[in-house]
């Protein structure tokens, strides 16, 4: 038994090689290039086999047809792009009985297929003539083939040869050409080829008729329109719908499959009818198409099921945030009410606080706890009402407002939408966006929210709206009236240390490819980072400083992999430079005319030293230190109080006429304002006039009246933490603020004495050094 030839195999995509035909092929895939190079090193023979699926890059044996053509490579040229162009001559049909993978190409065992000729030469000649005549008519009709092409087959008197040559010229599918390869019975092959020639002739005749029809209906100069009409007539003759009709059909299916209400579906279908009637070249066609897309993509009834579990919600909030106990308690109360009533018409929560304290992440946690989708709508800098309500469709480039865009993004009618930076909205000649927000947030109106682009009422009543702001004063009063404000005062120093140690440091160490064996940041270093390298209410800047520290540690680790870096307070200067911030420190001794006040800033609390100097003069009161109007008025009130108590304080009746008083608050470049320094100014003033020193360990805060009463202030918690940090051990505060003591950490209260005062007499009793 003769041994089967082993021939390299070249898989073909989108083409077929026929025997008795010389043709060019471009080879680009590695599986094909390696097979060609193997053949060129041998007898230059390969077997060309077509793929069943042209999308497969490296086909397996079962993805190839079993019958191919053995060909001879006559020439090979390497092109600049790395591919090969080969000139091949098809030799004979063959069947691949087995395939073996060699490196990146296949070697196939091939069996040469013997063709079955017709019973008589007369019948063979008849088939040859029929094929030749059919091919001549095909050439005459085809605009792509020249008349000389027919000359290629005129002298061929072999049925197999003529059928292969004619087959190679036909513009038919690869599957049809493969059928002609598979047929080894020449009579069957001839019948199939004659039928294919007949079909192609009919198609060419029809194409010619279509071209003639189109040319009669249009002007020669309208070339672009002619091309569109040609496609339209072709599709019409084939019984197919044109491109626009297909769009209409697809849009109708989407409308039927959407969750629109019946009324909105009726509207969409009405717009679809308009879209179908309007020419595709019309500008209005694009506007209607865009409108229909929005109607289809908006959620109308789809909802996510609520998972209102108060215990799960508490767990989620504790996982995502440390501290903020009062805030968490209020949010849990809110979720509890939702769980019991399933009614969303309750208050809209507005989280107010400085940047970086977790307002946005709190909103995300609420959405996660309720099992709802979450999206954020940024309102910072919005000045145009159309940003909320959208633009009318008559405008060029019109689009829906931010509410509709948010609803499209989440895809359900009951998401959690965070209205971020609601205090940063402004208004101008284009309208007032805050007024548009009233309709969004008002439960009596938002079930029929009107967007100018959509035009139909849209139900926002199932949406849970949350809002964030940095300053309560920036929120328009009508909006504020519809929201319940939750104040986030920021993290305490103790909370920042805990967050840094347990969350920020592990996160950054892992993010930068280190672990606890490479870097340890000591507690004193974290405290120094909090106190002197950051000044903020939140922890964003703190995280950036930790990230910078870890980056420098990562570089040191690469230089000395075996060394473990232990970061202490003293090493921070080497890594981060000198600290940019300095918190106030208490006085080192009891001084006359210098009192320590407590201030509340956007970054937390701080101490405020107030100095008073009394010199001979004409009764002038001078205020320096970049004081705001309220603080200047507090100084004047303190002065009036002292004058009214001159007899009790044993001052001369005309002391204010003979002396000039200068009140100064250090750090003159920093603006200062507020009424809470009233009792501090009065104490420093009385100390300077009576020459009695003020106790260095005492800090105080409270507003003063002309009668000497001490009125309540805000931010006692933050002020107490700053006093504790600065070494103050006694705090004088308004008696009406006693309720705020419960917010102060116990660790701070254990080291400090809190004395409530109602009158300046009480302040002076505890603040001034006793006269011996």
Image: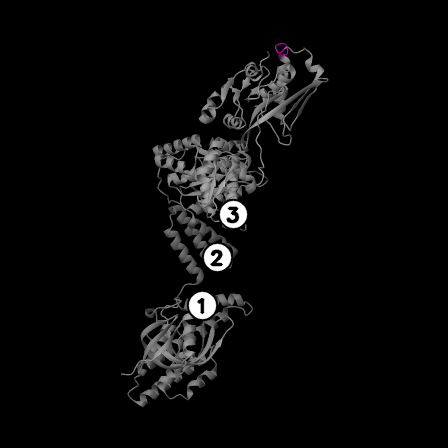
Identify the disc placed on residue 278. Answer: 2
Q: Is residue 748 above or below residue 82?
A: above
Extent of the magenta region: 645-649
Residue 535: quadrant of the picture: top right
Identify the disc placed on residue 277. Answer: none
Left/right placement of residue 572 relative to residue 126 reads right
Badge 1 marks a residue whose secondary structure is helix
Front residue of 220/560: it is 560
Quadrant where the C terminus lies?
top right
- Check disc 1 and report the residue beneath it: 233
Left/right placement of residue 527 relative to residue 657 reads left
**How far across and how far down the image is residue 203, in percent?**
41, 74
| Residue 488 at least partly seen | no
Distance from the alpha carbon under mark 1 to that under mark 2: 19 Å
Left/right placement of residue 141 relative to residue 577 reads left
Front residue of 608/419: it is 608
Distance from the alpha carbon under mark 3 to that under mark 1: 74 Å
Residue 322: quadrant of the picture: top left
- Check disc 3 and report the residue beneath it: 556
Which residue in the rendered view is the most extreme toward the front? 562
Q: Earlier in the sequence, mark 1 or mark 2?
A: 1
**How far across and how far down the image is residue 307, in percent?**
35, 39
Badge 3 marks a residue whose secondary structure is helix
Front residue of 265/17: it is 17
- The crowd level at tag 3 (other Cα within 10 Å; few <14, some 14-19, many 20+) is some
**How far across and how far down the image is residue 593, in percent?**
63, 20
- The crowd level at tag 2 (other Cα within 10 Å; few <14, some 14-19, many 20+) is some
Left/right placement of residue 456 relative to residue 130 reads right
Badge 2 marks a residue whose secondary structure is loop
Q: Is residue 300 above or below residue 595?
A: below
**How far across and how far down the image is residue 217, in percent?**
50, 68
């Amino acid at each position: 038994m003769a041994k089967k030839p082993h021939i390299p195999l070249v898989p073909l995509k989108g083409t077929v090689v026929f025997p008795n035909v010389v043709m060019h092929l471009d080879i680009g895939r590695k599986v094909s290039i390696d097979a060609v190079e193997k053949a060129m090193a041998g007898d230059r023979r390969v077997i060309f086999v077509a793929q069943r699926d042209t999308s497969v890059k490296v086909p397996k044996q079962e993805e190839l047809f079993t019958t191919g053509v053995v060909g001879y490579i006559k020439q090979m040229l390497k092109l600049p792009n790395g591919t090969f162009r080969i000139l091949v001559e098809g030799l004979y049909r063959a069947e691949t009985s087995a395939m073996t993978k060699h490196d990146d190409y296949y070697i196939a065992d091939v069996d040469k297929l013997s063709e079955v000729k017709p019973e008589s030469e007369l019948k063979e000649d008849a088939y040859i003539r029929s094929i030749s005549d059919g091919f001549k008519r095909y050439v005459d009709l085809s605009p792509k083939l020249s008349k000389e092409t027919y000359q290629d087959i005129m002298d061929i008197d072999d049925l197999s040869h003529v059928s292969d040559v004619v087959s190679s010229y036909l513009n038919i599918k690869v599957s049809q050409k493969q059928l002609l390869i598979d047929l080894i019975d020449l009579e069957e092959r001839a019948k199939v080829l004659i039928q294919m020639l007949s079909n192609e002739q009919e198609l060419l005749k029809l194409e010619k008729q279509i071209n003639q029809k189109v040319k009669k209906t249009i002007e020669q100069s309208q070339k672009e329109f002619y091309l569109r009409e040609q496609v339209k007539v072709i599709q019409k003759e084939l019984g197919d719908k044109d491109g626009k009709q297909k769009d209409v059909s697809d849009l109708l299916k989407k409308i039927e499959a959407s969750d629109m209400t019946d009324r909105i579906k009726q509207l969409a279908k009405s717009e679809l009818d308009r879209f179908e009637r309007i020419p595709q070249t019309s500008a209005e066609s694009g506007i209607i198409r865009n409108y229909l897309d929005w109607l289809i993509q908006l959620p109308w009834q789809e909802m996510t099921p609520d998972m209102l579990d108060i215990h799960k919600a508490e767990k989620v909030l504790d996982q995502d945030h440390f501290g903020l106990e009062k805030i968490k308690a209020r949010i849990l109360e809110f979720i509890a009410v939702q769980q019991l009533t399933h009614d969303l018409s309750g208050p809209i929560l507005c989280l107010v606080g400085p940047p970086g304290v977790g307002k946005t992440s709190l909103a995300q946690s609420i959405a996660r706890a309720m099992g709802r989708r979450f999206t954020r709508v940024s309102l910072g800098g919005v000045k145009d009402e159309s940003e909320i309500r959208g633009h009318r469709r008559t405008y060029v480039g019109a689009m829906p407002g931010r509410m509709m865009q948010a609803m499209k993004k989440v895809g359900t009618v009951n998401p959690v939408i965070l209205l971020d930076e609601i205090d940063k909205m402004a208004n101008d000649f284009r309208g007032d966006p805050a007024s548009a927000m009233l309709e969004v947030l008002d439960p009596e109106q938002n079930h029929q929210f009107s967007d100018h682009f959509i035009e139909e009422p849209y139900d926002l009543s199932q949406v849970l709206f949350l809002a964030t702001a940095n300053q309560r004063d920036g929120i328009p009063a009508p909006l504020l009236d519809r929201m319940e404000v939750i104040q986030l005062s920021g993290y305490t120093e103790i909370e920042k240390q805990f967050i840094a140690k347990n969350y920020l440091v592990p996160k950054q160490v892992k993010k930068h490819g280190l672990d606890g064996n490479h870097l340890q940041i000591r507690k004193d270093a974290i405290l120094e980072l909090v106190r002197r390298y950051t000044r903020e209410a939140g922890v964003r800047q703190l995280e950036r400083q930790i990230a910078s520290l870890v980056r420098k540690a990562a570089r040191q680790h690469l230089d000395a992999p075996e060394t473990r870096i232990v970061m202490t307070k003293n090493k921070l200067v080497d890594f981060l430079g000198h600290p940019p911030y300095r918190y106030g420190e208490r006085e080192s001794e009891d001084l006359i005319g210098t009192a320590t006040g407590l201030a509340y800033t956007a970054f937390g609390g701080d101490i405020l030293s107030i100095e008073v100097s009394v010199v001979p003069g004409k009764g002038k009161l001078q205020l320096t230190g970049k004081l705001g109007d309220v603080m200047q008025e507090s100084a004047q009130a303190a002065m009036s109080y002292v004058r009214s108590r001159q007899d009790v304080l044993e001052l001369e009746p005309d002391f204010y006429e003979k002396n000039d008083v200068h009140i100064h608050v250090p750090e003159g470049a920093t603006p200062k304002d507020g009424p809470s320094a009233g009792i501090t100014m009065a104490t420093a003033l009385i100390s300077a006039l009576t020459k009695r020193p003020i106790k260095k360990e005492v800090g105080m805060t409270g507003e003063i009246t002309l009668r000497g009463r001490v009125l309540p202030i805000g931010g006692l918690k933050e002020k107490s933490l700053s006093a504790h940090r600065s070494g103050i051990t006694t705090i004088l505060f308004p008696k009406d603020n006693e309720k705020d003591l419960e917010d102060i950490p116990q660790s701070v209260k254990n080291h400090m004495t809190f004395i409530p005062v109602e009158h300046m007499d009480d302040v002076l009793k505890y603040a001034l050094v006793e006269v011996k």
